[in-house]
Amino acid sequence: MDTLRWQAGTLFLLDQTKLPFEEIYLPCHSWQDVRQAISVLAVRGAPAIGVAAAYAVVLAARSLCQKGGDTPFLTALEAICQDLDAARPTAVNLHWALTQMMACARQHEADGAEAVTAVLEEKAIAIHEADVAINTAMARFGADELEKLGRPLTLLTHCNAGALATAGVGTALGVIRELHRRGLVSMVYADETRPLLQGARLTAFELMADHIPVTLITDNMAAWTLKTKGVDAIIVGADRIAANGDTANKIGTYGLSLMARELAVPLYIAAPASTFDLSITDGSQIPIEERNHDEVRSFRGVAAALPETPVFNPAFDVTPHENIRAIVTEKGIIHRPDAVSVPAFFQH
Ligand SMILES: CSC[C@@H](O)[C@@H](O)C(=O)COP(=O)(O)O
């Protein structure tokens, strides 16, 4: 089951709003289709959003070639990229992929719009394929690191940082998959992850499909689970990591990090280099997406509160770097991330 598929000039996205009950591919024929899919979380997870956005740029370039118009090709493409970038403001992989695509377009500008479109397609496919390899490398580095904790491991994860959030085996779940392959996973506790239940609908589904032992808990059971179930480590993904290691991830991760610190459970982040935003010094500069309030008042149309109930619905929070034991990347491990170790890691 692929999260995304590029076939004969159409992007097919596994519609994650329907999982785990229905496995339906959503055909995206235009960049607007992709933008809509990103907004409603039909495709989600920072790396998968980046790959989808790269294909959206190909669709946009193709449509601009067909339509023509007064605005210069690259100016029009740039405006579309800005619109796509705004679809999910926290996940920096989206911005990263769009920047890569625009740089590629500019590099080949002199060859004309048709040629640029062809090169952009090659670039999007390269970004897609690279994500698969990046996940595999991260899984190995992460498993080597967590293996040091002893065995068998009881782990806890939050949201979905799996195959469904990437083009490959996943970031945090990629590490868990590799640990399982080595016979080192005793149990994975999966937070259900309110309000949109990525943990219940996607993580539990993914792990069960791979016969990895998983136990679903509601988010408010995490502290008690950490205290009573012998959890050896927490491992999660990330949406944006500042230069000092402060990490934005799904809302609830910050709370987990406080529990982890209190209970001396190490917290690991697994994220590719494209999730780092070295242009910002710390997590206070990370934009936090706030989503529709109905996501909290109800789930799939079933009301949980009165429609006029006031709501706060931030989709992400920021975990301070002090609460993170290590960040697993495709280039290796950043131990005890801080304002010195993170930039130094990327200088080599
Ligand atoms: C490898 S995915 C890492 C993060 O993107 C993931 O943990 C997360 O927070 C996803 O949030 P979502 O709102 O489902 O896109």
Image (spheres, helix red, strand yellow):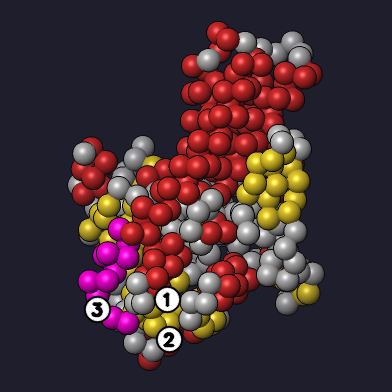
Say if the magenta span includes residue 307.
Answer: no
The structure residue drawn at horizontal position 38% and vertical position 91%, both measured from the top left corner, is: 228
Q: Is the C-beta separation of discs 1 and 2 under 8 Å?
A: yes
Query: Mark on residue 225?
Result: 2
Q: Please give the name of the residue rendered at 63% of the width and 22% of the height, measured from the top-left corner.
A: 117
Q: Do the numbered discs 1 and 3 sit on residues whose CB atoms are within 8 Å? A: no
**Residue 256 picture quarter:** bottom left
Q: Amino acid at mark 2?
A: Thr
Frontmost of labels 1 and 3 is 3
Residue 134 placement (x, y as % from top left): 41, 48
Return the x and y of residue 34 as percentages of the image width and height: 69, 42
Residue 172 badge: none
Residue sitting nearer the eye, 165 or 77:
165
Which image quadrant is residue 281 in?
top left
Quadrant of the image containing the C terminus: top left
Q: Name the secondary structure under disc 3.
A: loop
Instruction: Give how far apart the Cα atoms at labels 1 and 3 are.
Output: 16 Å
Residue 150 disc label = 3
Q: Position of residue 14 (x, y in %)?
A: 68, 55
Q: Secondary structure at mark 1?
A: strand
What segment is highlighted magenta in the picture? 141-152
Q: CA distance from mark 1 to mark 2?
A: 9 Å
Label 1 vs label 2, nearer the camera: 1
Callout 3 environment at 10 Å: few (<14), some (14 to 19), or many (20+)? Answer: few
Q: Nearer the viewer, residue 131 or 78?
A: 131
Q: Which residue in the structure is indicated by mark 1?
A: 156
